[in-house]
Image (cartoon, rainbow, N blue to C red):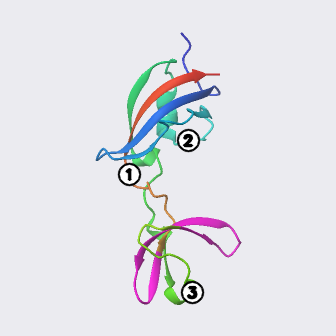
């Protein structure tokens, strides 16, 4: 039976969990995730784990943070004067917002701290610094 190799377009069903067992994403109830192996379309730890799998095969994969979304970068946090944030913008901790950098590029950020004087925004990926666990089933190799 054929094994998935770099350059193949594959479809997988998956459930992604944190090491505490909480689920952060799943393809359950959706179409399988389709991507080209080795192309950088998904995190490297999961991409590498799918390589060599056969259709119908399932496995559990531990993906360290460095092979997932990397370590959190302290420079990814920015304090903004609260007076510069429009009043209609929600500032609940954990709220995801988009800001523009000076060049006009849009950056997703998370509100991580709010005081009377400032709002701290974090541009790190929400899963940065997290080791992940995936349950994976290879559905198809194209």
| Mark 2 neighbour density, 10 Å: few (under 14) some (14–19) many (20 or more) | some
Give the CA distance from mark 2 to mark 1.
16 Å
Q: Is residue 113 left or right of residue 13?
A: left
Q: Earlier in the sequence, mark 2 or mark 1?
A: 2
Q: Which residue is mark 2?
A: 42
Rendering coords of residue 134 (x, y %): 41, 37
Q: Which residue is mark 1?
A: 130
User: Judging from the image, what secondary structure is the residue with disc 3 in?
Assistant: helix
Give the CA distance from mark 3 to mark 1.
31 Å
Q: Residue 84 — which label?
A: 3
Q: Are marks 3 and 2 in contact (CB under 8 Å)?
A: no
Q: For residue 6, which quarter of the picture?
A: top right
Q: Which residues are magenta?
A: 97-120
Quarter of the picture holding the C terminus: top right
Q: Earlier in the sequence, mark 3 or mark 2?
A: 2
The residue sitting at 42% across, 41% down in the picture is 16
């Amino acid at each position: 039976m054929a094994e998935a190799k770099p350059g193949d377009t594959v479809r997988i069903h998956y459930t992604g969990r944190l090491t505490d067992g909480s689920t952060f994403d799943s393809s359950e109830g959706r179409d399988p995730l389709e991507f080209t192996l080795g192309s950088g379309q998904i995190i490297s730890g999961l991409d590498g784990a799918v390589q060599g799998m056969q259709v119908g095969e399932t496995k559990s994969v531990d993906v360290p943070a460095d092979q997932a979304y990397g370590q959190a970068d302290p420079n990814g946090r920015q304090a903004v004067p609260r007076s510069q944030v429009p009043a209609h913008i929600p500032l609940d901790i954990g709220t995801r917002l988009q800001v523009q950098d000076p060049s006009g590029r849009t950056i997703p950020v998370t509100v991580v701290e709010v005081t009377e004087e400032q709002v701290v925004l974090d541009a790190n990926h929400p899963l940065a610094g997290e080791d992940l666990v995936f349950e994976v089933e290879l559905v198809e190799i194209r």
